[in-house]
Image (cartoon, rainbow, N blue to C red):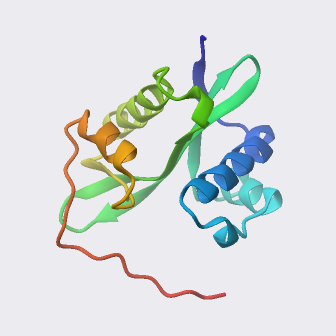
Amino acid sequence: MTFSIRKASKNDIPAILSLVHELAVYEKAPHEVINTVDQMTEDGFGKNPLFYCYVAEAESQIIGFALYYYRYSTWKGKVIYLEDLYVQENMRQLGVGKALFSKIIEVAQEENCQRVSWQVLEWNTPAIKFYEKFKAGFDPEWWNGYVELR
């Protein structure tokens, strides 16, 4: 099957959010997704976009996405943070994830970023092995902190 990678448009948001729900099920947290199409459209394509996204498309269907935003590291400088990279289960092993991740690396290089960073669940062995193919490093020292506001 052939596929293409392209920048997401606001018309893609319903399909992207549907894939976000699939990802949440895979990560055993479907109840955690509270985002909406309207909110994602505003946040990604409004006056001050908070994120950017590439989609993988095959036969006019969105089969995967890579959603990222820019961060700033006081130690490194400009960084791309890959919030989510997801490919539908039946489309894996076709090179879609590799193409999406490679696109994010390309964008980071073009934007003079010092790093691409992301999180992966410790039990998600397929994802860890995927990232290891890119010679990714994993930091065992830092814990993820957060405060829930809702």
Q: Which residue is at 75% across, 39% downward?
A: 12
Image height of 131 relative to 1, above or below: below
Q: Which residue is at 28% across, 76% downward?
A: 143
* Corner quadrant of residue 126: top left
Closer-to-camera residue (64/116): 64
Q: Which residue is at 82% across, 59% downward?
A: 38
* Corner quadrant of residue 40: bottom right
In the picture, the quarter occupied by the C terminus is bottom right
Name the residue furthest top: 2
* Corner quadrant of residue 59: top right
Residue 14 visible in the picture:
yes
Q: Which residue is at 60% across, 26% downward?
A: 6
Closer-to-camera residue (1/52): 1
Closer-to-camera residue (103/114): 103
Is 139 displayed left or right of 30 in the figure?
left
Is 148 displayed left or right of 118 in the figure?
right
Q: Position of residue 37 (x, y in %)?
A: 80, 56
